Image (spheres, rainbow, N blue to C red):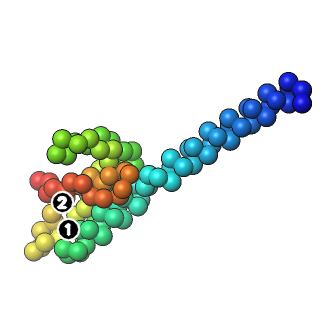
């Protein structure tokens, strides 16, 4: 093999490795849509919800001294004729709701 062929093969190998790593990283993290679906399923166990939202970009969230990469979102529920809003954080790695609270 000539030097030119070796360099081309090495370049293709590096590019393929980089693309494969990006694909694996994306498969390990859940999408914002999946995170919202998980949160809505959790909230629906306690009654119907009338609206929901989620930020598409993960942010850092601290809970019990641990730092998480999490999606932030919210749901609206109608309880006794009044709309109540709740915010939540969903872990990017596992899809678990790590925090939720009622907002004013």
Q: Secondary structure at mark 1?
A: strand
- The residue that appears at 23% across and 42% down in the rendered structure is 66
Q: Which residue is mark 1?
A: 77
Q: Are marks 1 and 2 in contact (CB under 8 Å)?
A: yes
Front position in the image: 49 or 38? 38
Residue 103: quarter of image: bottom left
- The residue that appears at 16% across and 66% down in the rendered structure is 83
Image quarter hosting the N terminus: top right
* Residue 73 visible here: no
Front position in the image: 15 or 34? 15
Residue 85: quarter of image: bottom left
Relative to 57, residue 87 above or below:
below
Q: Which residue is mark 2?
A: 85
Relative to 96, residue 58 above or below:
above
- The residue that appears at 15% across and 63% down in the rendered structure is 84
Front position in the image: 72 or 91? 91
Residue furthest to the front: 1
Residue furthest to the right: 1
Q: Position of residue 56 (x, y in %)?
A: 40, 49
Q: Secondary structure at mark 2?
A: strand
Answer few, some or many: residues within 10 Å of disc 1's Cα (few below 14, many 20 plus, some between 14 and 19): many
């Amino acid at each position: 093999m000539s030097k030119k062929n070796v360099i081309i093969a090495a370049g293709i190998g590096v590019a393929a490795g980089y693309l494969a790593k990006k694909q694996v990283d994306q498969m390990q993290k859940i999408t914002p849509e999946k995170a919202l679906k998980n949160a809505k399923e959790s909230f629906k166990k306690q009654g119907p919800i009338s609206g929901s939202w989620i930020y598409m970009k993960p942010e850092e969230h601290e809970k019990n001294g641990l730092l998480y990469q999490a999606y932030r979102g919210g749901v609206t529920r109608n309880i006794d004729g009044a709309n109540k809003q709740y915010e939540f954080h969903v872990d990017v790695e596992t899809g678990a709701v790590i925090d939720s609270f009622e907002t004013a």
